[in-house]
Image (cartoon, rainbow, N blue to C red):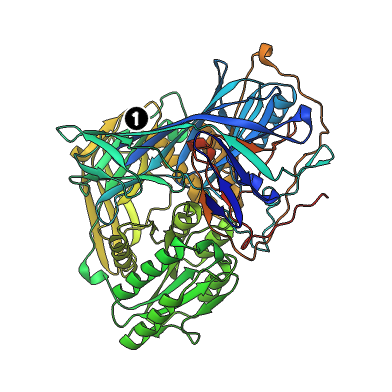
Amino acid sequence: MLGIGGYKHTREQGGVSQIKMRPSEWGYWGLIGRCIAQAPSIQVVKLKSVTVDVSVRGFVAKVSACSTYVNTTKYPLQIEYRIPVDESAAVYSFEAIVNGRKIIAQCMEKKKAENIYKEAVTSGHTAVLAREDRLMSDILHLALGNLPAGETVELKLRMIMELRVKSDGAVNFTLPTVLLPRYCPQDIAYNQHTTSVARFGGFCFEPPEFIAVSDVYSTDIRATVNGGPSISHIVSYSDALNVNISDDGMSAEVTQDGSFKADHDWMILVYYRNPYKTHVIRETGERSSTGLMKDDLLMINIHPEVPQHSYSNRNEIVFIVDCSGSMRGENIQSARATLLLFLKALPMGVYFNVICFGSTFSLLFPEGSQIFTENTFQKSIMLQKSMEANLGGTEILQPLKYVYSQPLKPGHGRQIILLSDGEVMNVDQVKQLVSRNAHETRVFAVGIGHGASTALIKGLARAGKGKSDMVYQQDKLQFKVMGLVKCMLQENVQDVSVIFNVDPPCGVKLVPKVPPVIFGGQHLIMYTRLPQATEVKSATVKGTLESEILNFNIKGTDIITSHDEDMILHRLAARAQILEWQIDEEEDVGGEMIALSVTSGVVSRLTALVGVDQDESSVVAVQQVSPQPVFSFRSCNMSGGFGNTNTATGGSSFYAPSSAAGFSFNAPSSAAGGALFGLSQSLQSSKQHYTEKMACT
């Protein structure tokens, strides 16, 4: 028996679960569906099985996830669900198989895709739609319209992820499976997703108090590792694994040892024998395509070193620690442990301060940053020990604005280190603020706990020209902290560029155009595009550190040429460019973003994947409804923060309403567990820390 915020979830072996849930919680479930013919009634969308195949090749991972559901009702269902994805992942394929018929989605401009989906569903055709959340790039909305009665559907999603070498030499692959609530500040109008008010054709919907959940679904997560450096060993700190490494160390197979409990992200750490060796892959382009997809693409993996004198204690370091309600439990413990290691790693003589924030914020030194001495260190330790997740909502903008409003210490660089689970909706606002101040203040970010928002954590580090890392329980925390401290104390490397010696001579372009930040000893990934039929004899990554010129050389013999049908490197480069544009506040990049997204097939904020079953014999009878949207959302301020997420495994049915025919439905983005990867049912505790009204308007 698990307590869920004052409500109880019971499960009997082989029996039926009964979950007592308040009305506002129905949206936290994974796959949801409603039957139009039966007015506002809850129907079952039963999960049968989940299979996730991961292929790790060097520093890239291909992920294929397939979930099998069955409509056990007598009516067609309109279904929508959402899943967490890593914000840097290139999502490029979504398809459904219904009764042997394959529906393959194509990438196009978002409004056009939504209109195609709407018209198809209204006319009775089965259709699929995948869209990136308009505010949070690490949430994906997936829809299936008109799942016929009694039919089984296989939903397949494919994506590509970039992998980086961590401070301890591990290459970390994480499959996001936990989607936590996102705090909505008062000044953010997010009426697409944040309300629990629902009207269906004039009916006000309220789910029943009890929901019955039965049966058990199967979960199969498999990974292969090959095509990269020799493998030393593979481990996981979150799950038991079966690992079989070949005798030559060039390939490995990984499977889950036992069942997977979806209350945490699934991850593996791959340790290569020589992860720091220069690794450059040249992927051939598609000759019949245009632009980026036509050219060849280089992925450069190097670990540049910088002179020792580039590290300085002439820095002001401001720690901003999330003490909002969502940090309760293990997260605030991890935040305290992380802050303690950071404080112990600071060199004497730096200026520092600590800010705790939630709905409001407070400073360790209200008069301003102080020099790090034994006395000020002891004061910071007293604060660190007393930190609790009791400051309400996650209002992250205000402490950042305060820091930026303070004058710089003469002769000192300023670094911000954010420790947070990142569960906020105003990600773009925060990233743009950080980007506007990156010329004088760098930002480093640490994501705390499973389900931490990669859109915020990675996005802030990228916008602030810093670095990011994720911290989980039982993680190698000390390696991560020391790696970030080393980067933080390093001076900026300026004027970064890549010079190529190619035959015949031609222009080679960085993707994106803005070069990445160089940190000594850290994994640097760069993408460049070059014309076909060119030979790369050598390349040099250049930069300046103070008055010193830095050169990092790449030999032509270091480059390995490959051809991949999925064009994984091209799509990763496209995603990197899209993310750069999303930080850019210029208004004229929308057309370029759509063009690149459509050409590469990689979903962006301005595009979507849509597919329609054209088989006329499979058209279902759909009840006519009003052409007005049947589900509207209001912005809500959850100033009390959020409680803990409790996850119960073993159930397989998802209950909740979905849209009337032809119109999209969006449950609140507060969700624990993403349905695509076969996550167990999860409910968000809301009795103590999350208030919300159900009302008919």
Place of residue 669 in the rendered image (x, y in percent of width and height, measured from the top left)? 61, 48
Q: Is residue 680 left or right of residue 668?
A: left
- The residue carrying pointer 1 sits among few (fewer than 14), some (14 to 19) or many (20 or more) residues within 10 Å by Cα, namely many
Location of residue 653 by image quarter: top right
Asked whether the viewer can see residue 131, the reply is no
Outermost residue, left side: 248
Q: Is residue 600 above or below residue 304?
A: above
Q: Which residue is nearer to you in this view: 293 or 236?
A: 236
Residue designated by label 1:
284
Asked whether the viewer can see residue 658, the reply is yes
Q: Which residue is nearer to you in this view: 212 or 136?
A: 212
Q: Is residue 23 left or right of residue 340?
A: right
Q: Residue at x 28, y 46 (%)?
A: 301
Residue type highlighted by circle 1: Thr
Q: Which residue is nearer to you in this view: 31 or 307?
A: 31
Q: How many marks?
A: 1
Judging from the image, what secondary structure is the residue with disc 1 in?
Answer: loop
Q: Is residue 428 above or below residue 359?
A: above
Q: Is residue 290 left or right of residue 273?
A: right
Place of residue 642 in the rendered image (x, y in percent of width and height, measured from the top left)? 58, 60
Q: Which residue is nearer to you in this view: 525 or 384?
A: 384
Location of residue 638 by image quarter: bottom right
Outermost residue, top side: 617
Place of residue 108 in the rendered image (x, y in percent of width and height, measured from the top left)? 59, 32
Place of residue 368 in the rendered image (x, y in percent of width and height, measured from the top left)? 47, 84
